[in-house]
Amino acid sequence: QASGLLSRCCYNGRVQWEVMSGISPAQALGICGRSLSRPKGSLGHLVTYAPFTLFPTPVPKAVFLQSLAVQTHYNTLVDKISQDPDFLQEALASTIEVDDFTARLFRIHQQILKEGRAQSITLGLNRSDYMLDQEEDGSSSLKQIEINTIAASFGGLASRTPDVHRQVLKVAGKLEESQRILDNNPAEGLARAVAKAWELYGSERAAVMFLVEESQRNIFDQRCVESELWKRNIPTIRKRFDDVSRTGSLDQDKKLFVDGHEVAVVYFRNGYMPQNYISEQTWDARLLMERSLAVKCPDISTHLAGTKKVQQVLARPGVLERFFPDQPRVVEQIRATFTGLYTLDVGPEGDKTVAMALAAPDRFVLKPQREGGGNNIYGSEICRVLQGANGNTDRAAYILMDKIRPAAVQNYLLRRDSPLKISNCLSELGVFGTYVRHGKDVVMNECAGHLLRTKSSEHSDGGVAAGVAVLDNPLLV
């Protein structure tokens, strides 16, 4: 079915705009684009399309609807964890002893607790990621990979990709299928929650500050959310850690000012990896923002709530009940999405986990406390890491998770300067969730849309930003 279309739209991975059937290159870049910085010393930027699948990927309707239905419960769970310092202390105690990055974040968390939170407004923009585990009878079950509580990306581009696949399917003569591509606008949903936090802050002059990286590879994704805020007449600014270090200050009321602008909301699109903190001044800037009256997305406790160690602890018997007493149905819905998660803390339970992993490493994934894709460890590398840390506290920096085994489907992955070929592909479903709490009152709790990312089955790990996965759309079956 694809051969005629492919000959018209692609050559050596370079998209020819005939596939857009009248959509210009500039319009197509608005559908899915990203900015790549040129080499140091050169002028300007290189703009290219974000990678995507030629066709949408079939996804069972039942598990898709399940992922949407559970998202508001995950929002509540993250919020409750962030308000429970005793739980965070218990959950992360072993990790902060051996993982310097998590320990630095935790020290900021402790300082804020000691001083008292300046702001009672909490804003959460989360994304819960899943894969569909293939059962022996051929059915699929929804299993969570992780939940992202900081810089959960691709809500902007996911809002534009439905138009791409609708048009591709029309060109391919698949009109009925093109009409089954779901409407999806996470950018609007994310912006709606940011706008609510900005409104509660109470100053029309104050801006939403996007805290961004030095070199932007995913700028258009962020610009989609910015555009939605400007539609609401909410001013936005884009600043880096260095800008906050040089020009950031708090007034006597702890209002945050950066480069002369009062900041109502700090939206972190940076700060989730150790390499984002290049100096002590960077860490000082993070603390300055956390101490301020600005609404943080996420605040430091919500950032810590998204760590892999917290995910593993939540899977222990009785832990979910701590956050949802007398709500067995909610506990059941959340727990149904868990896969096997195992501690590597020093002690008999951690020793048992190590023995299990060494005996069958291909059954598992070894996960450090890191975000951003490309960090997980597989196969024989698991043995190398655990044998090197066996009996050592260093192993507590990781958790072990059952490897999810989704069914592969065939598709074409379109990337800049990448050869075009049909590939066996695996997909990952993300669901965006938003919430706003004002004091003790939750004033917003929503599922804001979805994201499908697809990669060749030859790759074990890595997201779109890591250069492995591409953007996709679900075609419900």
Image (cartoon, rainbow, N blue to C red):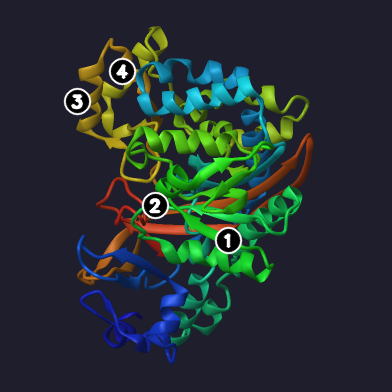
> From the image, which quarter does the C terminus lie in?
bottom right
- Front position among marks 1 and 4: 1
Q: Residue at x 42, y 90 (%)?
A: 21
Q: Secondary structure at mark 2?
A: loop
- Front position among marks 2 and 4: 2
According to the picture, the residue beneath numbered tag 3 turns out to be: 384
Marked residue nearer the N-terminal end (3 or 4): 3
Instruction: Tell me the kind of residue under disc 3.
Output: Arg
Instruction: Tell me the kind of residue under disc 1.
Output: Thr
According to the picture, the residue beneath numbered tag 1 turns out to be: 236
Marked residue nearer the N-terminal end (2 or 4): 2
User: Residue 441 appears at what percent x and percent y?
Assistant: 80, 39
Q: Secondary structure at mark 3?
A: helix
According to the picture, the residue beneath numbered tag 2 turns out to be: 213
Q: Is residue 4 above or below residue 298?
A: below
Q: Nearer the viewer, residue 288 or 318?
A: 288
* Alpha carbon distance from label 2 to label 3: 33 Å
Marked residue nearer the N-terminal end (2 or 3): 2
Residue 472 visible, this orientation: no
